Image (cartoon, helix red, strand yellow):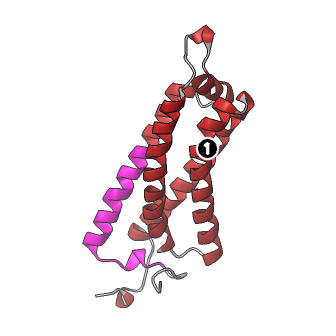
Amino acid sequence: MRYFTNRSTLARMDLNTKLIITYFMVFMLAASAFAIYMSWERTRLSAAGASAYYRGDEARMMFPKERLELIETTHFHLFITPVIMLTVGHLFLLSAWSRRWKTAVITSGFAYAALDVAKPWLVRYVAPELGVLATINSALFGMTMLLCILVPLYEIWFLQVDPTTRPH
């Protein structure tokens, strides 16, 4: 746990460690961009679009999402989203940000991930007005992911540290 302090451990890493983290983070950025694009295609990033996507829309000939489809999507997201948050979150914890900010970012990331899993069920079975969760939660979750990705990338490549303090 000594690594998760207010001093950046990221800037002090050796080149190969920086490269593997960078490659991973670039893939996470691409995955996030495709998630936004996929949401755009499905919902046009609007509350009405999200409601139509999950509840169906006769005018657009869209069928409501079936229970089994929601179960399958939920199952997948319950496995993969926490793993992604765990990974990018740990890298973010190596940053020089304060403990309070780290706690807020990591906690909000997992909260947004939980809401992301619940969102289809709420929109489909509780109320179409909850489609607004799609746009709000996606924006907040996206900003949190960007922080967890871009802060480490910045500190790895641009944060200046005393070279004598690098680990060997």
Q: Secondary structure at mark 1?
A: helix
Residue 60: x, y in percent? Answer: 58, 11
167 part of magenta stretch: no
Specify whether residue 131 is in view. Answer: no
Q: Tell me where the magenta segment starts and ends, as one range.
A: 8-31
Image quadrant assignment for residue 97:
bottom right
Amino acid under disc 1:
Ala
Q: Residue furthest left?
A: 16
> Measuring 62% from the left and 56% from the top, which residue is drawn there?
111
Residue 20 percent coordinates (x, y): 29, 64
Image position, residue 149 (x, y; %): 46, 59
Query: Looking at the magenta stretch, what is its main secondary structure?
Result: helix
Whether residue 168 can be seen here: yes
Against 31, residue 145 (above or below) is: below
Say which residue appears at 52% left-offset and 34% top-offset: 70
- Split into 4 quadrants, where in the image is the C terminus? bottom left
Q: Is residue 9 magenta?
A: yes
Q: Quadrant of residue 33?
A: top left
- Per the image, the residue denoted by label 1 is 118
Q: Nearer the viewer, residue 135 or 15?
A: 135
Q: Give residue 154's quadrant in the image.
A: bottom left
> Is 150 on the left-hand or right-hand side of 129?
left
